[in-house]
Image (cartoon, rainbow, N blue to C red):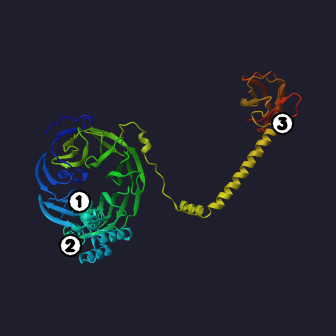
Amino acid sequence: MSSAESSGDGGKWLDAHYDPVAGIYTFSSCNRLVVGDLGSGSSGMKLKVYRGTALMSESTLLDLPAGLVAFFMDLHEPRIPAVAVASGPCIYVYKNLRPYFKFTLPGLEINTLEQDVWQQVKEGQINPLTLKEMLESIRKKADVPLSVRSLSFLSLEPHEMDEFVELLKHQPIKRQTVITCIGTLKKNMADEDGVSCLVIGTESGEVFVLDPEAFIILSKMTLPAVPTIMDVTGQFDVEFRITAVCRNGNIYILRRESDKPKYCIELSSHAVGLVRVGKNVVVGCTDETLQGFTQKVKALEDRARRAIVTMASMDLPTRGFQAVLVGLANCEVQLYRDKNLLSTIKTPDVVTSICFGRYGREDGTLIMTTKGGGLMVKILKRTASFDDRDSAPGPPLAQSIRLNVPKKTKLYVDQTLRERESGLAMHRAFQMDLSRLRLAAAKAYVKALESSLTPMSASLAEPLKMNAVVQGLGPSFKLTLNVQNTAACRPVTNLAISFLYDESLYRMRNPYMRIPLLVPGLIYPVETFVECTSDKGISDVIKVFVLHEGRSSPLLTAHINMP
C-alpha cells in the first residue's frame, strides 16, 4: 500500500489503494467489500468478495441485486456474519462464502375476474381478441392490479396473441412483487454482534421483518408508496423505527405498535440518499440540497452545490465523531457535519458508492467505487482532526444553533384553546380598543397643535424648533433655550419669549425676552437665570412660550420640570 497523501482533502487521508479497472459496478447499498456487482445490467451480475484489496471469490447472481447486508443469524461460535443479497423477489443468504438459504416473497392477491377470463380462454370459450377487450375493461375498473402475464398480453400485436395464449394458458396465474431495498434490525440486543432480523421493502409498498433463523415473516407493514431507501434503528422486541424514502417524494416513519406510517415528511424533490446521524436523518435530494430532519420536523438545510450521486455515514465512536459523506457528480466527496463542510476529497472519477468503517486493522477506512468500475481505498490518518468551522462561504456558525425554546405549559395550551373558541370576539374587542386608541391619540395631537405644546411649531410661515437645558444644583439655575429656524431660506423676525411660573417658588431675572432675527439653519441659545426662593424643598413646572407680535396664541410652548 502506498502512503501518498491525497490532494484536495487537507492531508487527512492516505491513499491505500486505487484500481481503475477493477470492473465493479455497484451502488452504496451493495458495497461492503462484499460487493453486489450489477454487471452490464442484463447479464454478468455477481457477488464479489474481497480480502484486503484482492478479489477472493465471486458467485453468479440470477437477477440484479437491489441491496446487500451482513447480519448475525445466531449465537454460535465463532461469530461469523452471514450475507443477505436481495435480488428480484428473493433473498439469497450466504454463510461461510457458500449459498445457505433462499427466501422468496409471498405472492400477491390475484384478481378473480382476471382468473375467470383466463379460465375461459383455457376452456376455449373466448378467443384472444375477446380476452384483450375483457382484460382492458378489468384494468380500468378493478381495485386489484393485473398480473404481469395479462399486462404483457395487452402490449402484444394481434398476430402475436395466439402464440402467447397457447404457451401460457395452462400455467397458473401469479402476481409476484420484487424487493426494492433491504436493511437489518437488531432482534433483542443492541450489541454489535447481536442477532439481527432482515427488513425488506417491496415494489408493492409493503415492508416485511423476517426472523433470522426460521426466515418467517414476523411483521408486515404497509406504505402509501414504493420504498426505495430505508434506515432502521432500534430492536424488534423492544422498540424500533423504520425511516423509508418512497418514490412519491415523501419520507414515512414506521414504528413497532403500528402497521402503517405514523409520520410523513414531504421533500422539496426526490431523494438520492438517506443517512442517520444520531437521532436525526440527513437526506440528499435531486435539487442539490442536503436536508436534515429530527424525528418530526425539519432541522437544517444546506446546498451541496453539485448533483448528489451517493451518500454514506462516517461514524468514529472512539473519537465521538459523526458526519455525512456525500459523493457529487463533479468528482468530489464532501464531508458534512450539521451545516458545516469540513473536508473535500478529489477523485479521478465520479463516485457511485461509499462505505466507511473498520476494515482489517484500521477503524477509519473509506471504500469507494467509481462510475468507470474502479475501486478506491483511503485510510483516515490517526492525527487527522476536523474543525466545526465551515470551509465553504456562507452564514456564520451561530446561525445554525437551535434556540432553546421552552416547553408548552398548561396555561399556554388553555390560552390557545380559548383563542380558538373566542377568536371572533377577541378580534372585535381588539379592533374596538385600537379604534379608541387612535381616537385618543388624534385628540391629544389636535390639542397639542391648538395649544402649541409640541417642540416644533405647526405654522408654515414661522417653522421653529426649540429645546431647553437646565444647569445647576440649586438654588440658582441657568436655563438655556436653543431656538432654531427650520425654514429653507426665509428668516423669522418679531419674536419674543415669555416665562410663566409660580412666583412664590421661583424668581427669574428676565421673565420676558425679545429674540433677534433668526437665520435659517442656525441654533440661537437664549440664556436666563432662575433662583429658587422656597426653603421647603419642592419644585414646579416653568412654562415657556415663544410669541409673535400681533398674535394672541403662542407659536411654541414648552414645560420645563425643574429639579
Residues under numbered marks 2 and 1 in contact, where contact means CB atoms less than 8 Å apart: no
Q: In the figure, residue 159 lies in which quadrant?
A: bottom left
In which quadrant of the rendered view does residue 339 lie? top left
Secondary structure beneath disc 3?
loop
Residue indicated by mark 2: 171
Query: Is the N terminus in the top left, top right, bottom left or bottom right quadrant?
Result: top left
Going by the numbered disc 2, the residue's amino acid type is Gln
Question: Where residue 371 appears, x then y in whole percent?
Answer: 23, 44
Disc 1 marks which residue? Answer: 191
Label 2 element class: loop
What's the amino acid at mark 1? Asp
Q: Which residue is mark 3?
A: 502
Quadrant where the image shows the C terminus: top right
Give the mark nearer the N terminus: 2 vs 3: 2
Q: Position of residue 296 (x, y in %)?
A: 41, 57
Type of the residue with mark 3: Asp
Residue drawn at the location 77% of the way across and 44% of the way down: 444
* Point 42% across, 45% down: residue: 400
Neighbor class of circle 1 (other Cα within 10 Å; few <14, some 14-19, many 20+) is few
Q: Of the two numbered discs 1 and 3 on the same chain, state the one appearing first in sequence.
A: 1
Q: Quadrant of residue 294?
A: bottom left
Where 325 falls versus 508 (above or below)? below
Camera-side residue of 453 and 441? 441
**Residue in the foreground of this view, choosing between 155 and 1:** 155
For marks 2 and 3, give the CA distance: 117 Å
Count of number-bearing discs: 3
Q: In the rendered image of this protein, does residue 442 appear above or below residue 127?
A: above
The image shows residue 270 at horizontal and vertical percentages of 36, 52
N-terminal label among 2 and 1? 2
